Amino acid sequence: MISHPVIWAFRISLRRGWRHPTVLKAALKAPGVGFVRGYSTPVTGMEEILSRVVAPVPSYETRDKHPPPPESNSVEFMHFYKTLDKEDKLYFLTKLSQDYGVDHKSVSELSVKLLDTQLRDLATVLQAEDRLRYTLTPRYKQLLSHISRVEGGVKFLVDLRADVFEIISSKASDSPDIKDLNATLKSLLSEWFSVGLLRLERITWQSPCEILQKISQYEAVHPIRNWTDLKRRVGPYRRCYAFTHAAMPGEPLVVLHVALTEDIADNIQSIVREFATLESEEDVNKINSAIFYSISSTQAGLQGVELGNYLIKRVVRELQSEFPHMAQFSSLSPIPGFSSWLQGLLSQYRKEGRGSDLLSEQEWKEVEQATDSSPGMQAMDSLRKLISTSEWMHSEKLPNVLEPVLMRLCAWYLYGEKRRGYALNPVANFHLQNGATMWRLNWQADTSPRGFANSCGIMVNYRYFLNETSINSALYLQNKVIKASEQVLGYVSQFQRNSKL
């Protein structure tokens, strides 16, 4: 078998663009060197690494007496994985999950033995169950656990899970073993990032520069334009909070931006674009409401690990402690996906010749007049073209014409469109799971290009009535019931009447 250093020398040369046919041909003929089509790393090198660093599973009887593998195994695995390109990572993770997962033969045998013990005493049954549970643990799980104890290991595993999640979501692989690896990583990360192990930090202008830079970099909802903008968002009448973890110092995991206002805000411009309060002193008498206007998860590998809902609850307690009189808690949320859903709906209704089910006869006439289009298909095409841009907002007539139309369509999108019985819109689903009420739709609430592209400029308040959140959350999660205000339900009823639902 060719030595490991020779394999690595070959690999490094290959990555540097070494493509001489004679050399390649000789290298490929070398004993023990194997390639998988589409992968640049010798398969033998991957297999050798895995066989060395993934320790055998101790027997059930010796599981508590078996010495841990050397830390160098974890370090070697981490270093090797970081050198791989995207294609090599896919193959490597596939090998890891398939060849070092659960011993299915042993599981089957122990399952039969467990069935045979059902008529025996309870102690025997419990021991058989414990033995089966031990055997159901993937072999690679021990390696993952040991990696978490190495410096930088937890961050490595978060990034590793991000790679696995991307493989699954992009459908680069439909391997059930890869999906099981993803589930194992998610389970471990959920334990390591449980709320009791997280630290709540308030970010201020005095926070370390590295943290401030990451807060700016990770802002996914309303991009931060410059340092002055950032200073505003952590200054007077604003609060910025983040969850951090001891194993990932200096790395915010999820970030929540809050505006402290007199009333519940109905537009984002007044929060992120006005700088009048940059140097002012806070007047506690002007602070009656807390507006959650941006929440961003920073680690793709922690997707599905509940952090955001706990962060909001912790921040509410923090604000109540600082402002005991504060009684109004609400989000001011974007509506990603509404515009694309609306385009699809208009296309569907055009194809089916059902335009009259979306707009009333009078509304169609107003659209025709405002767009100088003929009745029927031309008017519908004009409407579709209009909502794909923000130009209609500069018209004198169109905003007034389209407001009732778009507001009731948006209300239906949020309230009526479902996935497995829950709200289709991910932001709505997040706040409803937390027990918030779908409280108010706001016209021209986000006039930025992004706001128009995502939701025709409409935003929504999800209001947190603290004495109702537990009940609302249970009703939504268990019975799929959405708690909504009269305003929202009124728009929904209008849509149902027009669409004859």
Image: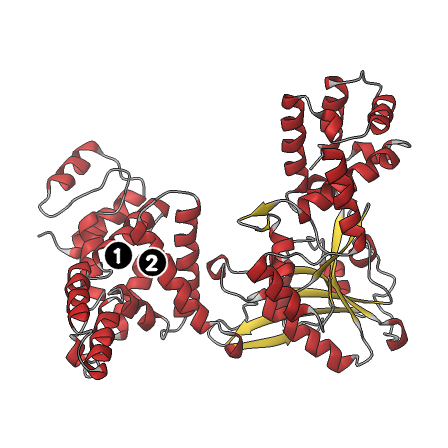
Compared to residue 274, the image places residue 355 above or below, namely: above
Dot 1, how many residues are within 10 Å of its Cα: few (below 14), some (14-19), or many (20+)?
Answer: many
Name the amino acid type tagged 2: Leu
Identified by mark 1, the residue type is: Leu
- The local crowd at label 2, few if under 14, some if 14 to 19, many if 20 or more residues have their Cα within 10 Å, is many
Residue at horizontal 43%, vertical 43%? 170
The number of discs equals 2
Of 419 and 72, which appears nearest the observer?
A: 419
Residue 471 in the figure: left or right of residue 88: right
Residue drawn at the location 48% of the way across and 62% of the way down: 302
Location of the C terminus (image quadrant)? top right
Q: Mark 1 points at which residue?
A: 96
Displayed quadrant of residue 388 = top right
Q: What element carries label 1?
A: helix
Distance, label 2 to label 1, CA atoms, is 9 Å
Q: Position of residue 276 (x, y in %)?
A: 88, 62
Residue contact between numbered discs 2 and 1, judged by CB atoms under 8 Å: yes
Check disc 2 and report the residue beneath it. 181
Residue 17 on image: x %, y %: 31, 40
Left or right of 48, for residue 19: right
390 relative to 84 in the view: left or right = right
**Quadrant hosting residue 351:** top right
Q: Earlier in the sequence, mark 2 or mark 1?
A: 1
Dividing the picture into quarters, in which one does residue 339 lie? Answer: top right
Q: Is residue 355 above or below residue 273?
A: above
Residue 443 seen in this snapshot: yes
Residue at point 76%, 81% (across, down): 322
